[in-house]
Amino acid sequence: MDNTTFKTNFLGKDGFVWWIGQIAPTEEWIENFGTNPKAWGMRYKVRIMGYHPYSIVELSDKDLPWAQVLTTPGNSGSLNTAETVRLAGGDVVIGFFLDGHNAQVPMIMGSFANTTQWQELKEKWKESGAPASPFGVFGGYSKEFNEANYAVNKSQDNSNGAESNLSNNDGLNTGYTSGGPESESYQYELTSTTGAEIDLCNKGPVSGIKSDVKTMISKVQGLKGILNADTEFYRDKVKSIVSSSSESITNHATKIASNMVGDTFKNIVPIAQTGLGVLYKGVSAKVTAATGNPAIGHVAGVAAQTAMVGPLNVAENLIGCLANNIIADLGESTEGILNSMVDNVFDVTDCVSDQVVGAITNDIIGKVGKGMDGALGGLDKILNFFSGGGFNVENIIRNSTSALAGAIGLRGCNEPIQTDDLGPCRYRLGYGPISAGDADLSAILKNANTAAAASTAAKLTGFPLDGIQDIVGAFDIFNSDMKVPGFKSALGECYSGFPTICEPPKIKIFGGGKGSGGEAVPIFGNITGEGKDRIGSVIDIKITNPGNDYQFPPFIEIVDNCKQGYGAKALSVIKDGKLTNIYMTSVGANYPVGDQPELSVIDVAILNPGIGYSDGDSVTDNFGNEYDVTIQNGSIVKIKPLTTTAIDGLVEFTINSSTGANADLSATIDIRPEYQGEVKQVIDCIAPRTGNLVGYVKGEPYYGNFHVHPNTGKKMVGAAHTTTPHEIIYDTPEESL
């Protein structure tokens, strides 16, 4: 019997599914160590982010799965060579699932470095009044380690099953002293990696800034959920997060500054060249008119141009140092921007991150404009002709999107803009790949100019804006009203507060090369609760528009506006550039659910036809449904539901076969048909009549004689079955092709 939904039943061919998790408190796994005859060392209880609930009530530490630790080469225990794995409760580890998407057999590959400031953190957590949380930073030390005393040195004997020599270590190498508390375990969350975004493509500084801003706000919101925002400890942790994020964002901003200086100077060069021509004509004309001698006028014009060589060289040298001077001042202003907006933002939408980019851009534009205006001060004679006089670098930048194209990473030096989407550029931990979205240069520049103009107007009225707004402009991110529903300003509608209504998740389809147009909606199961509190899993995704021109299967993002759901992941299938199927690899939980009628399996997609199947093999599912199976050359080529029992979860198929293997089936779920009776298989053996359509062969209608295959029950051409190959008659032209 082949019980398979997504598996090939061959280890190593089912994909690699990795995870990040945290070792549970010591008391839940310590029995695996020491002289206990039932001990299985190198196993730990692990709570895995994105897979396990953020509630000890929903899933206790005791009920967490066991995770086996992989050892380094030469550390298997053979030949009396072994080293004890030294992990402690609270350690954050990374690993993979041995059973792929089933996610029931976790393996630990390594761990992240831990803090040595446990004693200090513990006292501050006490002061904060923070509630308990299943994820968090807590000390691995406890009295159980002294009692177990299980650590083994490399140099000591390990008989691989017999009683081992024990070291006199007091516990794991946690970085904590033996003077720590003996039984206390503080499980509070300082930060959470779940929700953090990773930039995989490095598409430019703007993409990097937007990702860093989202990750920063995600970390801050994690603190707000467990700490009192009025405490000094909370403020200190926020400052630490902002400071760390500022370093990364400043690194991206330096690229903007460097590119902006270079690109702006390249734009000024042709202006200066034109100005030299204007200068020559003006001087030559005046001298010629005064002397009546064109030759003297020409010499005077050339002399005027030559006099500009010195100032041009000075300007070029000064501009060469300008980028470094600007970069040196970026860190402080960037941190000021982040500190001023961090408390005003709950949900980092694209408009929020675009405003952060705009604020940083305004800061850089101001610095570039001021610096270049100073460097170009000696070139008034060849620049003032531009825009009718009063040459101003900042005005040039603000009125030209091309001047900012390289600055925000839409192109490199003399490189075309990349338009092909070759894959996901962002990955959100616990959620999967997410669409990166392209920076809207025009919108960023427009809002940056509007915000800067508002700041300038306030100065002219004698009421300059407070703090950082006076420098970078009046952006909404500095306004606490941004968290009020219905908020809008001169910059548009940019609400950053908690969603007022938690809507069912939406499906975003992206990637796949040059393809576009794909649309789909989620289907829910495992539903609990009533009314607005109904929650459930995403058990299927229904394609409403197959799209066009996909070069490879696009990525599927499940977007939950309240971010309360977790764990649902899906993959897509394409044919001839169109979406043909989206199937779930993990259904997740806790997603908001709207009204939904009863569901059933209406079709089955064959992801892998398998091999070795025989006529008479059958297929059922975990809800009791039966299916009609068509097998050709040992492979499953068609499968249709015979019954339509209501379903409420992920459909798992059981292929009853003594010979076949590796078939991979995916259920297509939709509204259950009104007729709920059992569908019987009927074979029509009525002899054909002249003019009656029998079926289709190779796409063409067939009206001739036919017979029914004695074993398969399929209609075939000819009045009787023979050993000579002959065509199968299909019900539709599509099947016959």
Image (cartoon, rainbow, N blue to C red):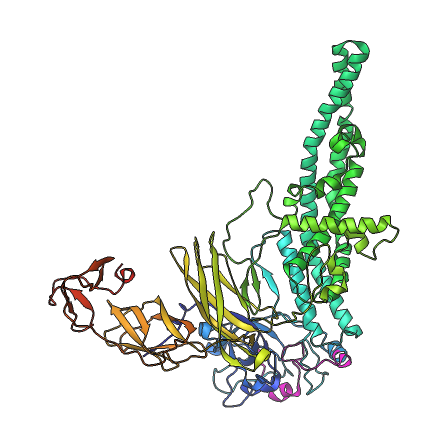
Is residue 541 left or right of 138 when viewed as pictured?
left
Which residue does the image show at 77% across and 28% down from the upper left?
Answer: 310
Q: Position of residue 548 (x, y in %)?
A: 43, 54
Q: Position of residue 61 (x, y in %)?
A: 58, 84
Is residue 86 left or right of 513 when viewed as pictured?
right
Which residue does the image show at 69% across and 44% down from the upper left?
Answer: 260
Which residue does the image show at 74% across and 11% down from the upper left?
Answer: 294
Residues shaded magenta: 125-154
Residue 336 is one of the magenta-drawn residues: no
Q: Is residue 551 visible?
A: yes
**From what the image shows, is residue 147 above or below residue 318?**
below
The one of 212 and 517 positioned closer to us in this rendering: 517
The one of 189 and 458 positioned closer to us in this rendering: 458
**From what the image shows, is residue 586 above or below residue 210?**
below
Q: Position of residue 107 (x, y in %)?
A: 50, 75
Which residue does the image show at 77% across and 70% down from the upper left?
Answer: 235
Is residue 697 left or right of 380 when viewed as pictured?
left
The one of 370 and 573 positioned closer to us in this rendering: 573
Residue 144 is one of the magenta-drawn residues: yes
Tell me the chief SS of the magenta region.
loop
Number of residue marks = 0
Q: Position of residue 554 (x, y in %)?
A: 47, 59
Where residue 302 sits, quadrant-wise, is: top right
